Image (cartoon, rainbow, N blue to C red):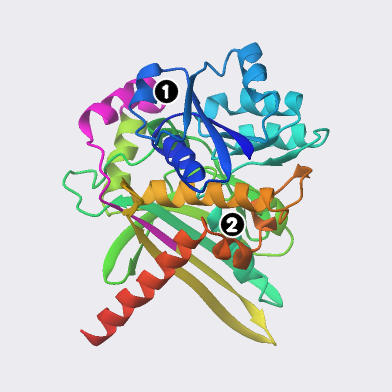
Amino acid sequence: MKRIIVAGAGKIGSAVADMLAASGDYAVVLADRSGGQLAAAGVSGAVERRELDVRDGAALDLILAGAYAVLSAAPFHLTIGIAEAAARAGVHYLDLTEDVASTRRVRDLAETANSAFIPQCGLAPGFISIVAHDIASRFDTLDSVRMRVGALPQYPSNALNYNLTWSTDGVINEYCEPCEAIVDGHRVEVPAMEEREEFSLDGVTYEAFNTSGGLGSLCETYLGRVRTLNYRTIRYPGHAAIMKALLNDLGLRHRRDVLKDILENALPATVQDVVVIFVTVSGRRQGRLVQDSYASKIYSRRVGARLYSAIQVTTASAACAVLDMLAAGQLPALGFIRQEDIPLEAFLANRFGAAYAQGEEEALRQRGRLAHS
């Protein structure tokens, strides 16, 4: 039985640990520096819980000794230390970060590592890159690749039209850091929270705007092959204007600890959420300009005896699927592996990746009901 270390006992880390342990194929250790966080994780008795401060390099080396892989679900600013420990221990490394600088360091470590390094294994970055690459591969030449993803409350009840569904640090980071894109064939950085647009899907109006990290490594992969490539986060209309006032007018982008405290004490968490995934690719096929799209909505659901939010389902399932494919020999066991290197068909066929296939089926049923209403 392969031993897996999951670093971080938050909403996503605990879901990853529980899903892996429930498969019966992995011995899972859930590590966190907070005993209270571990106690509140709600994982099954099959998961070993261990207090560990990942900033303690010696303790981290000790827990990784003999492990098959470590999966970082810790805050983004702890990612590099965990990746460096994985390289020292020679164990496989996966993470969920959207932080661009951390991923660059992971890529550097992979060049000399004796194991696989697979960053950004969540929803966005993560699954969204797998989908976009799969669609883009069907074209002779590409014009544009546009990716839109959002984790939203099903029942918004405040002016921000938002509830906390995952890492507050992660949300703030993607709202503040520069965003990569390809514009007119050139790789550029564009400001977060800008280039707002509105669109409708299944009769619901959304807004979308630039956020950092969602493209993963796609800018590098598609540079010179596409005119336009961008990623934007989906929210309900009105959210961006208020967040920009907080970040820019009140200067809270420079006081992230204050902003985090405000959000966590003003916005309730919810498991009644929906993840919206929308990818549109245009280009030429057999000389004709055509467009293909992928749209899916995934809702909170029960997995076994536990109710998971939609963002837990999508993020944890994606990470578990990639790890499971690695363990099954479906992915290279050495070097840096990009999300777009992962075949969509194999991902959806995986027992964990099947959560996304179920989302596709639900979206098709919903559109069928709308068409006949």
141 vs 22: above or below: below
| Residue 220 spot, x, y in % from top left | 71, 51
Pick out the residue farthest to the left: 157
Q: Is residue 151 left or right of residue 128?
A: left
- The percent position of residue 102, horizontal first and vertical second, equals 62, 32
Measuring from the top left, give residue 320's x and y in whole percent: 54, 47
Task: Look at the image and say whether residue 256 sits in the magenta stretch.
Answer: yes
Q: Is residue 367 left or right of residue 221?
A: left
Label ID, residue 254 = 1
Q: Nearer the viewer, mark 2 or mark 1?
A: 2
Q: Secondary structure at mark 1?
A: helix
- The residue shown at (72%, 64%) is 225
User: Residue at left 54%, top 78%?
Assistant: 291
- The x, y position of residue 60, in whole percent, is 62, 18
In the rendered structure, which amino acid carries the disc numbered 1? His
Q: Quadrant of residue 141?
A: bottom right
Given residues 100 and 363, the one toward you in this image is: 363
- Answer left or right for 168 relative to 16: left
Q: Do the residues under discs 2 and 1 have CB atoms within 8 angstroms?
A: no
Asked if residue 352 is positioned above or below residue 363 in the image, the reply reads: above
Point out the image quarter for the N terminus: top right
User: Badge 1, how many Cα within 10 Å: few under 14, some, many 20+?
Assistant: few
Start-end of magenta stretch: 250-277
Q: Secondary structure at mark 2?
A: helix
Q: Magenta stretch: residue 155 in it?
A: no
Q: Which residue is mark 2?
A: 129
Residue in the image at 55% along x and 43% along y: 213
Amino acid type at image mark 2: Ser
**Which quadrant of the structure image shows residue 250?**
top left
Q: Nearer the viewer, residue 208 or 266?
A: 266
Tally of numbered discs: 2
